Image (cartoon, helix red, strand yellow):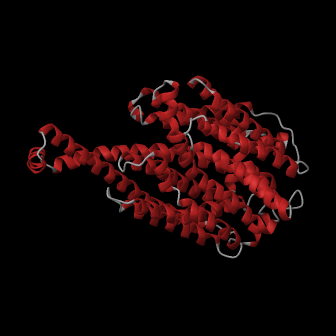
């Protein structure tokens, strides 16, 4: 694929790379930074934690809707113009979120924040590729992928620290400074690099079906655990609406002359397989991002800040290995990177599966440190493989659709992982209680430490609960180890990126 403009050089290229990759970082960061702050936000606004979770849900739904629309928006208005508009909107609505004094206002502003955030993810990748020389496009994807990997890690850390030490509004106010720099920097560097504008009529029916599908599906995932899934008529109705609107959406988009989402990218073998693997990796990875802080805070007694620090080491190897992977991709069979990354991730999860309630901070941090080498190897390589065979006009749409599916996979991983973890905790607790004798254990405790029967019962109950949580955590990581190895087998069907045809078509 021929580049639309000459690549940037020297310091301008470095600054442009930092700015565009950071555009991706702040959006992904906002996906996770509010998670640990929900109890604080809910308490301050006088609502329940359950109601407070809508702050997360509405942002995720809005973001998921606009991500796959990026290709159409870029053609209609120009990619640079859409990028700057979305950053400006993200700045405005982040500020309004910080000033919100009620849950209703916060939810409304979060919806608009998510709508403006969605296109920034694929556009940051597309524009980043456009400023790099063709032979260094792998390095561009390495920078972009590194930001996608480390952003979900810094989210809980920043969110926890702000919740513990500052007012929750700073979770949103921190975006102001970065967005202002991003707006002015991008305008200066990319003002003369606008893409070709192709006006097409709006696919209103496709857009309507997409909104219905994403909204119903996200509500089903977020509320399913709380309402006992399909035991609830509400969840069942959401599932039916989501399924029907999805089927109708696919049929409509395939037959529509000017579809709002270009589904023709699925014809690319590399795009389809790489997206499949990438979605599963992020499904499991995001389950890990969610379960780790919950386990550390619920069982190990960590604060929100320290639980974030315990998972932070993933960023060390992610930063180190990402540029190395970018440089080696044109020289080495890219399937080796994917398979190696899968094995490293599986090994990290296996290490987690062996931990116990006496695990030290170092014991918790080491598997996370190892994980930092596996995620970039998969993320960067699979993202590059996904666009390697696409036509020039398909790149933005393909990137947008891939990121949409990745975001949906993260939502699925988040919901199912927590559901499984809580289910296994209850199951393990029942099994442990069946193995023990209440009366004998309580009597033994009373004799040894001279406490009342009620105190002995409470001590015994807490011990059982802690062991049940630990075993559930071990079960989650053990099963994740097996599943991710099985899914890694699909990597052998990918076409290597160093293939001449692939390199030629690479942005």
- Which quadrant does the N terminus fall into? bottom right
The residue under the point 23% across, 45% down is 430
- Say left or right for 428 vs 132: left
Residue 440 position within the rendered picture, expressed as x and y whole percent measured from the top left: 8, 48
Residue 19 position within the rendered picture, expressed as x and y whole percent measured from the top left: 76, 52
Q: Is residue 474 above or below residue 220?
A: below
- Say left or right for 158 vs 74: left
Q: Residue furthest right?
A: 192
Q: Residue furthest bottom?
A: 331
- Which quadrant does the C terminus fall into? bottom right
The residue under the point 55% across, 41% down is 162
Residue 490 position within the rendered picture, expressed as x and y whole percent measured from the top left: 55, 63
- Residue 459 figure quarter: top left
- Residue 453 figure quarter: top left
Q: Is residue 200 above or below residue 196?
A: above
Name the foreground residue: 254 vs 409.
Answer: 409
Residue 377 visible in the displayed image: yes
The residue under the point 25% across, 44% down is 462
> How many numbered circles does the render carry?
0
Residue 330 position within the rendered picture, expressed as x and y whole percent measured from the top left: 71, 72
Residue 263 visible in the displayed image: no
Name the foreground residue: 448 vs 38.
Answer: 448
């Amino acid at each position: 694929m021929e580049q639309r403009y000459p690549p940037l050089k020297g310091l301008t290229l470095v600054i442009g790379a930092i700015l565009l990759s950071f555009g991706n970082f702040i959006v992904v960061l906002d996906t996770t930074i509010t998670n640990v702050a929900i109890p604080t936000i809910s308490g301050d606004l006088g609502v329940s934690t359950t109601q407070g979770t809508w702050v997360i849900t509405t942002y995720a739904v809005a973001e998921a809707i606009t991500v796959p629309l990026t290709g159409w928006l870029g053609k209609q208005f120009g990619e640079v113009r859409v990028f700057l508009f979305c950053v400006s909107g993200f700045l405005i609505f982040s500020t309004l979120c910080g000033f919100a004094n009620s849950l209703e206002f916060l939810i409304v502003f979060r919806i608009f924040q998510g709508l403006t955030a969605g296109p920034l993810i694929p556009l940051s990748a597309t524009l980043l590729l456009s400023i790099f020389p063709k032979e260094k496009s792998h390095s561009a994807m390495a920078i972009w992928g590194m930001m996608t990997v480390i952003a979900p890690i810094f989210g809980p850390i920043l969110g926890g620290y702000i919740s513990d030490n500052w007012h929750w509004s700073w979770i949103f106010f921190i975006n102001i400074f970065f967005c202002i720099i991003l707006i002015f920097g991008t305008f200066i560097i990319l003002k003369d690099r606008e893409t070709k504008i192709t006006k097409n009529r709006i696919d209103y029916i496709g857009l309507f079906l997409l909104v219905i599908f994403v909204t119903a599906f996200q509500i089903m995932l977020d509320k399913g655990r709380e309402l006992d899934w399909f035991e609830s008529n509400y969840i069942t109705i959401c599932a039916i609406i989501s399924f029907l609107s999805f089927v109708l959406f696919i049929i409509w988009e395939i037959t529509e002359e000017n579809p709002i989402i270009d589904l023709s990218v699925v014809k690319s073998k590399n795009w389809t397989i790489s997206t499949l693997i990438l979605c599963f990796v992020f499904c499991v990875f995001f389950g890990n991002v969610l379960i780790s802080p919950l386990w550390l805070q619920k069982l190990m007694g960590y604060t929100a800040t320290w639980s974030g620090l315990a998972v932070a080491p993933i960023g060390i190897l992610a930063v180190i290995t990402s540029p190395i992977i970018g440089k080696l991709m044109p020289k080495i069979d890219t399937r080796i990177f994917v398979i190696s990354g899968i094995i490293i991730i599986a090994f990290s999860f296996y290490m987690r599966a062996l931990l116990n309630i006496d695990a030290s901070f170092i014991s918790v941090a080491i598997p996370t440190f190892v994980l930092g080498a596996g995620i970039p190897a998969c993320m960067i390589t699979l993202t590059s493989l996904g666009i390697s065979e696409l036509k020039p006009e398909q790149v933005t749409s393909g990137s947008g659709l891939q990121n949409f599916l990745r975001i949906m996979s993260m939502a699925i991983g988040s919901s199912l992982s927590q559901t499984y973890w809580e289910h296994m905790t209850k199951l393990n607790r029942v099994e442990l209680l069946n193995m023990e004798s209440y009366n004998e254990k309580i009597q033994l405790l009373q004799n040894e430490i001279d406490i009342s029967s009620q105190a002995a019962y409470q001590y015994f109950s807490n011990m059982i609960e802690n062991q049940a949580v630990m075993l559930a955590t071990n079960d989650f990581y053990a099963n994740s180890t097996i599943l991710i190895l099985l899914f890694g087998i699909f990597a052998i069907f990918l076409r290597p990126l160093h293939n001449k045809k692939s390199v030629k078509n690479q942005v």
